[in-house]
Amino acid sequence: MSATPNLEQAPPKIRRAQIVALTLLMVSGIVNYLDRGTLAVANPLIRHDMGLSLGQMGLLLSAFSWSYALFQLPVGGLVDRIGPRKLLGIGLIVWSIAQAAGGFVSTFGWFVLARIVLGIGEAPQFPSAARVVSNWFPLRARGKPTGIFNSASPLGTALAPLCLSIIVVQFHWRWAFIVTGVLGLVVAVVWLAVYRDPVKATMSEAERRYLEGDEADRKPAPAVTFADWRSLFSHGTTWGMLIGFFGSVYLNWVYLTWLPGYLTMERHMSLMHTGIAASIPFFCGFLGSLTAGWFSDLITSGSTNPVTSRRNAVVIAMLGMVAFTIPAALVESNTIAIVCISVVIFLANAASASSWALATAAAPPNRVGSLGAIQNFGGFLGGALAPILTGYIAQTWSFVPALLTAAGIAFAGAMSYLLLVRKPIDDRPVSTETLRAPA
């Protein structure tokens, strides 16, 4: 058997399960980002109909990110304990009901509550996806499937204004929330009916050997405990990933939340041109996520240390984000700026896909979801802070120092990955005495 198994070498039964899992993760991920983007697409009409101030709209826009970030911490442990099928299924139902509720709210307070619940419901999506990849793919073949499920993020972001604006214009902004909420419930039914977590007791020896790969001789991992989850914070690798993803997502969310406003206010582009120009970088991000999966597997296949190789892929992508943000902020040409921003979003999604692949390599088998969620918690603290700090800096000075600040934060994140993420996390059983011992 090859030492570096891949999707094409999977036994037929495993390959079918892989295709089904990735297809469902892509569909649920696209719906996930359509739901997030509905508020941004309908922003002006919602403000007009509900009489909201800019400050209230800012609070409404940030409500999702804070609850999403905070719920990453418990969700990681839950997905490792009860499995991605049940947890993502529950999450789909919760977030879809909250999304549909956005179409019926009549007051600002209820709208904020709906967005908070949306963040809670969507929290299991990516930790569950990381655990699905860990369950159904061997260690050295997880880059491409991670890139595939992660590509739903920029693809959903790019599709949101194209698809939802039609509903908003032809019907009403409330229908955009209702339709996407119902769509999510349909996906929830399909996910629960079709997806299954692997049951190795029903597998052949060849199928088990394929999934276990380099870990074939290891004993089955015990169920994750709270002590196991808490022990992750005693490792430099965990902190490097948490801080590093903060920098990566911060810079990405500057563009995600402020790109249309930046193009109209700072670069004086018309609304028509802004709509087209703002979608181009996110289609590039879709390609970046897919490319990162292939690249991450390529460099890992020739490495004796999967953690180091996948970490290096993250660092290279993040340094590229920094390098292209600087000219994007400083050049006078709008065309060159859009090209640079497109490269940044391409690399941002490459970095994100590589970061999730890193979680599957660095974590013990029973704590992949936990480590991925902790990393995502750090990322979405950055995602929640980015629109607020960027708006303040742009209002006080301009978007140029705001973008350069974001580049500096991303550079610090890259250094956190490089200097702190050096080895996989030890998977030996955790004792209370170990946790109490001084570092």
Image: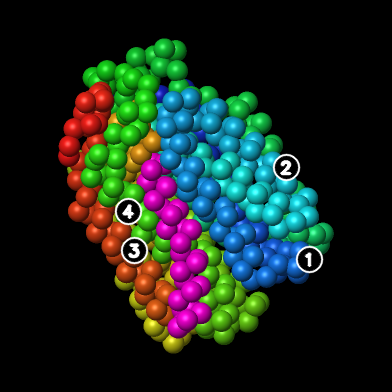
Image quadrant holding the N terminus, namely: top left
Kind of residue at badge 3: Ala
Q: Earlier in the sequence, mark 2 or mark 4?
A: 2
Position of residue 111 relative to residue 258, above or below, is above
Kind of residue at badge 1: Asp
- Residue 67 at what x, y percent from top left? 53, 48
Report, in whole angstroms, how far the alpha carbon at label 2 lies from the one at label 3: 37 Å
* Residue 396 visible to the viewer: yes
Q: Earlier in the sequence, mark 4 or mark 3?
A: 4
Q: Which residue is mark 3?
A: 410
* Residue 322 visible to the viewer: no
Compare residues 188 and 288 and report the one nearer the observer. Answer: 188
Task: Say if the magenta span includes residue 328.
Answer: no
Q: Which residue is mark 4?
A: 243
The image quadrant of residue 403 is: bottom left
**Disc 2 or disc 4, which is closer to the eye?**
4
- Residue 197 at what x, y percent from top left? 48, 24
Report, in whole angstroms, how far the alpha carbon at label 3 lies from the one at label 1: 38 Å
Q: Which residue is mark 1?
A: 49
Q: Earlier in the sequence, mark 4 or mark 1?
A: 1
Q: Residues within 10 Å of mark 3 (few under 14, many from 20)?
A: many
